[in-house]
Image (spheres, helix red, strand yellow):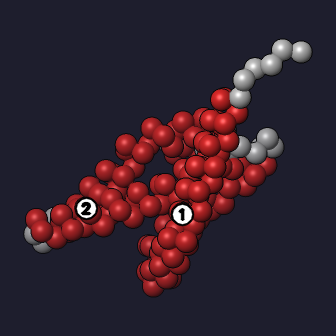
């Protein structure tokens, strides 16, 4: 699965399709994973953790999928590869920090959340602009030469 995710992430159109499918996998999985970490305490804590985990997962997923969808519009492959490799590096760094430097992980999580809150509206505007331009281009009458 790791190899499939790594390779799929490098192909622009396949990457966007993969992210579309994973919208229905990643977000519930994030909620269930978070709930499972505190389920031994009480059902109330598990419910709250599921909400928080699903929200965090949804925010990070839509930030990734939206930004990659906009990056994929570029005709050259290098920006897509750079974005993909930087994501891979950030995942490895976050996993290392979560296991060996928890305070650093929490600081990185806080910074990521602030960036997500700042960038998600911009991504939404960019996606709406692309959809509007596509719709306008499709509405243009075809003229014969």
Q: Nearer the viewer, residue 100 or 134?
A: 134
Q: Nearer the viewer, residue 111 or 6?
A: 111
What label does residue 110 carry, if any? none
Badge 2 marks a residue whose secondary structure is helix
What label does residue 121 carry, if any? 1
Identify whether 27 is placed above or below 40.
Answer: above
- The residue to which callout 2 is attached is 50
Task: Name the outermost residue toward the bottom.
Answer: 103
Q: In x, y percent, where is residue 99?
A: 44, 73
Horizontal side of 56 relative to 60 (left or right) equals left
What whole-number distance in Å separates the C-alpha atoms at marks 2 and 1? 24 Å
Q: In x, y percent, where is residue 65?
A: 54, 50
For label 1, count other residues whose C-alpha is less than 10 Å away and answer few (under 14), some (14-19) or many (20+). few
Q: Which residue corresponds to the image point at 59% horizontal and 62% vertical from the top-left? A: 122
For label 2, count other residues whose C-alpha is less than 10 Å away and answer few (under 14), some (14-19) or many (20+). many
For the C terminus, the quadrant is top right
Q: In x, y percent, where is residue 83?
A: 68, 55
Does residue 4 show up? no
Identify whether 22 is placed above or below 84.
Answer: above
In contact (CB < 8 Å): disc 2 and disc 1 = no
Q: Quadrant of residue 50?
A: bottom left
Q: In x, y percent, where is residue 33?
A: 29, 58
Q: Which residue corresponds to the image point at 54% horizontal and 36% vertical from the top-left? A: 17
Q: Which residue corresponds to the image point at 70% horizontal and 33% vertical from the top-left? A: 137
Closer to viewer: mark 2 or mark 1: 1
């Amino acid at each position: 699965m790791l190899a499939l995710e790594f390779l799929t992430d490098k192909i622009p159109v396949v990457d966007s399709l993969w992210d579309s499918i994973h919208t229905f996998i990643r977000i519930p999985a994030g909620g269930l994973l978070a709930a499972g970490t505190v389920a031994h305490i009480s059902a109330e804590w598990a419910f709250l953790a599921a909400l928080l985990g699903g929200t965090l997962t949804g925010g990070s997923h839509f930030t990734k999928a939206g930004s990659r969808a906009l990056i994929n519009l570029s005709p050259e492959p290098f920006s897509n590869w750079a974005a993909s490799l930087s994501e891979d590096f950030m995942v490895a760094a976050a996993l290392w920090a979560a296991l060996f430097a928890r305070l650093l992980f929490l600081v990185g999580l806080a910074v990521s959340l602030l960036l997500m809150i700042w960038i998600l509206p911009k991504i939404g505007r960019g996606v709406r602009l692309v959809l509007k331009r596509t719709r306008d281009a499709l509405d243009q009458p075809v003229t014969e030469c």
